[in-house]
Image (tube, coloured by chain):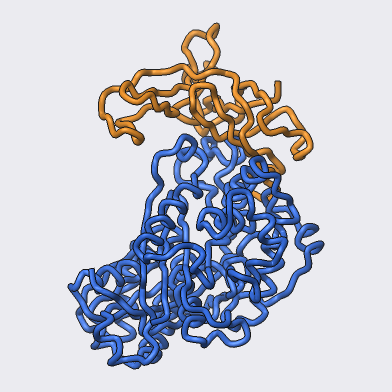
Chain colours: A blue, B orange
Amino acid sequence: MRDVAVIGVAMIKFGRYPEKTVPELAAQAAILALKDAGIEMNQVELVASGNLYQSNAMVGQRILQIIGQTGVPVINVANACATGSTAFREAYMSVASGAYDVAMAIGSEQMGKMGLLGGGAGGGDPAYSTEGVLGSGLMPAVFGMAGVEHMRKYGTTLEQFARVSVKNHKHSMHNPYSQYQTEVGLEEVLNARMVGWPNTLYMCCPTGDGAAAAIVCSMEKARQFTTKPIRVAASVLTSDPWTQRDLTMPDINTLTRNAAKEAYEKAGIGPQDINLIELHDCFATAELLHYENLGICAEGEAGRMIDEGVTAIGGKVPVNASGGLLSKGHPLGATGVANVCEVVWHLRGEAGNRQVEGAKVGLAHVIGLGSACTIQVLEKV
Amino acid sequence: MADAPAAEKQQKAIVPFLKIPANPAEKPYLQGSRCKKCGATYLGSRMACSKCFSTDAMDDVKLSDRGELHVFSIVHQSVPGVPTPYVAAIVDLPEGVSVRCNISGVEPDPKNLKFGMPVQFVAEKIRTDREGNDVIAFSFKPV
């Protein structure tokens, strides 16, 4: 495998765009990424398009019908919440393998106000619906239970989980691409409407629309296009291995740990070398688990880490400087590509008022339930 | 006016791994399968073992009706038509199987629930389906 660089990134502000189609949202991000890379569509040799809710509708080709029908291979990717990050990895793999020199990953989603995910209504007779009868498949409860397991093991408190929401909302104040840019206090988070205990409203990411794009290129050619190539030091995808409860309670911990181990090995670094992280805070409870899963603190230390501000901007390892999924939003197919954008901006020193000073190595982590985990390690060259 | 002969109403399980014995003297139970090679145990029937990849036929296991509460959440906002709040939980059974279920018989408040507390399997009719059959579901209640 050869070295690959990110040479262009872009995203549109996440939010609600009912007047636009999915390919229109995606095309805006793609055109901005092409401009960022300083290339034109006819220089892109492969396109990987991530979109979940229209995964049967050739979103990638429909984007090219807007921005340039070059006839190149288009791969439409679906992988739950890891859809966009899997598309990024497809683009990366196509260049790393030597098969192509320049590839583009585009992530897009239009969720509107679709509400809670994971209820699994499905077809057939609703008398056989299991939601609320055989527990819950709703995401606030699923990730609530994952947090409660941490509470059981280590005594993590409601306040510690709520502080994740306070931190990420605070970070979002400086991100013009964030769906919400609203600061919230600890009491406000704790007293907000309960959705799935212990996750209150502000501890749940919103639904919404958005798009992001990233262009990757072989490192040897990258200098032709940019003075600031960002090296992809690792791009990893794992699925859920067998663990005793996984089929009943998705084991997002082992899933992420396997990916992190592989990513650190491939990048030849350890968690102590990471300067910033964009991780999958779909719910506030999830963020704390991933501090330990990604190895940025010891087992059981995540609660203390958030209390001490280590993961806030200005701390030792800022996490979710973008505002995270909690504030920036989580249009599923766009999320993983937007994470890459955010990390690239910091490594280039272009993240404005939320810039993590002196960042040299960043990590983007996404999980998709069912389950998939992606980790991209990006490095300033 | 003579009534048309009514179709036989049945008791139907909400999920395939809930077994309702034909003999009414026998109680409903959860069915599992155990890998002959590595011993991994699963809810319901399986084609192969996802732990050791064995494709040999598995042993059928009648799972215990007692377990312990691993973790829970309390769902306050759900999909339309589902009454809230309810306790969503993961219960561990002694056979090494975990079950996703509701905890019944308690007010849905975290103070009523303790990690590791013993819970008892309960099966009951919850709804009637379109064809008039009884839909049987299960939950676990604190002992």
Quadrant of residue A170 in the image?
bottom right
Quadrant of residue A321 in the image?
bottom right
Residue drawn at point x = 40 percent, y = 27 percent: B40
In the image, is A43 to the left or to the right of A312? left
Instruction: Please tell me whether residue A13 is drawn above or below residue A129 in the rendered image.
Output: below
List x then y, in percent, for residue B134: 55, 25
Residue drawn at point x = 50 percent, y = 58 percent: A294
Q: Is residue A79 visible?
A: yes
Extreme left residue here?
Answer: A99
Instruction: Please tell me whether residue B49 is drawn above or below residue A169 in the rendered image.
Output: above
In the image, is A290 to the left or to the right of A173? left
Residue drawn at point x = 67 percent, y = 79 percent: A173
In-front residue for pair A76/B80: A76
| Count of marks overlaid on the render | 0
List x then y, in percent, for residue A259: 41, 56
Q: Quadrant of the C terminus of chain A?
A: bottom left
In-front residue for pair A345/B75: A345
List x then y, in percent, for residue A279: 53, 64
Q: Is residue B80 visible?
A: no
List x then y, in percent, for residue A289: 58, 53
Instruction: Please tell me whether residue A4 is drawn above or below residue A297 in the rendered image.
Output: below
Q: Quadrant of the N terminus of chain A?
A: bottom left
